[in-house]
Amino acid sequence: MDHAADAMHTDLMTITRFVLNEQSKYPESRGDFSILLSHIVLGCKFVCAAVNKAGLAKLIGLAGETNVQGEEQKKLDVLSNEVFVKALVSSGRTCILVSEEDEEAIIVEPSKRGKYCVVFDPLDGSSNIDCGVSIGTIFGIYMIKDAGAARLEDVLQPGKNMVAAGYCMYGSSCTLVLSTGSGVNGFTLDPSLGEFILTHPDIKIPKKGKIYSVNEGNAKNWDGPTAKFVEKCKFPNDGSPAKSLRYIGSMVADVHRTLLYGGVFLYPADKKSPNGKLRVLYEVFPMSFLMEQAGGQSFTGKERLVLSTGSGVNGFTLDPSLGEFILTHPDIKALDLVPKKIHERSPIFLGSYDDVEEIKALYAAEEKA
Ligand code: FBP
């Protein structure tokens, strides 16, 4: 193996070149998506640099403000949000932005509008920022028909309607993982070039994994199926080896490991947070989109009843004659959810197909019980 030649690899598949190749498959496309993505990539490069020098540049610590989630905002949260909002608006390709850090959706002024809605968490894993553990940016992209008449309803739609999703992890290396609906690809930032280079082509998650990832600190508040699943991971009764527990506490890092190594990441509902913790639009949907594109799956458990407005979406249908909710869609795929609020939360179980099937079976069994 001629490492020198390898190091001087000259046929560089940058993320821009990759997306342009993808785009050339659609003769009608005008390049709007690649322009939008280049602005998201710019935001990721900026945040990567800021995270790397956070300790030196006094970017550690609190910004002294609180966000809509009631969380104290970190300086890097505020900075990352500002960079992405400005980059997305200046792309001229967006009409609605939903950020974890902004209470209201941002409706882009008509003169600067384009046909895309972007939902994003500018810096996910805030609790790990100050100790230098991997954190990330998560984004999802919808396309709407009439940007001129952009309305909030245009983002309150099922995740399966997204045209693309991705995340950028700021860890030992900076890795951007993207899907435009035909598979999942990973790109690593080459700091010497300032370019994201294709390093993980066509990522496929193993069908079954050896790892489970959950905050066991919440175990006392879990429902039956979640407790049973984690118990099975630790004490399997079918002769298979116990799974290992890995939990970083940054969804991007935990999902990235799950995507590459297999296994399952879960943030279930519990008595303390009946709808779980993670947000549907800019955490659950993008990660579920990527997981399904990589051959895995994503499931919400059965807490959906909590959010049903009686109109019968999300798994249960109100049977007026019984005045009862009847389970009509037992296995709610996360991407079928229809959020009602931009910061809505949902339980989530995602990862290797067979592992998530096990969890679904436990919920279905409890349903039948
Ligand atoms: P934010 O930091 O963007 O609010 O994200 C939420 C998050 O940090 C996820 O990244 C992570 O999976 C989860 O919360 C960790 O929650 P907990 O500390 O309750 O385990």
Image: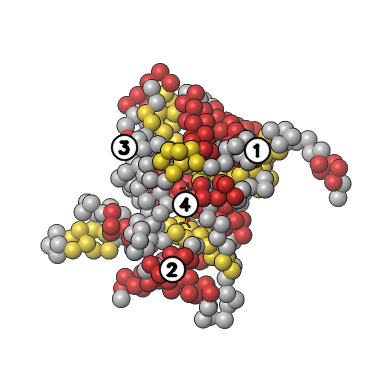
> Could you say which is closer to the camera, residue 148 or residue 266?
266
The reply to whether dot 4 and dot 2 touch (C-beta < 8 Å) is no
Q: Earlier in the sequence, mark 1 or mark 2?
A: 1
Q: Which residue is mark 2?
A: 219
The reply to whether dot 3 and dot 1 touch (C-beta < 8 Å) is no
- 290 sits left or right of 276 in the view: right
At mark 1, the secondary structure is loop
Q: Is mark 1 within 8 Å of ligand 1?
A: no
Tag on residue 153?
3
Q: Is mark 2 within 8 Å of ligand 1?
A: no
- 303 sits left or right of 296 in the view: left
At mark 2, the secondary structure is helix
Crowd class of label 4 (few under 14; some 14 to 19; many from 20; radius 10 Å): many
**What amino acid is at disc 3?**
Glu
Disc number lying in front (3 or 1): 1
Q: Which residue is mark 1?
A: 56
Is residue 315 shown above or below 242?
above
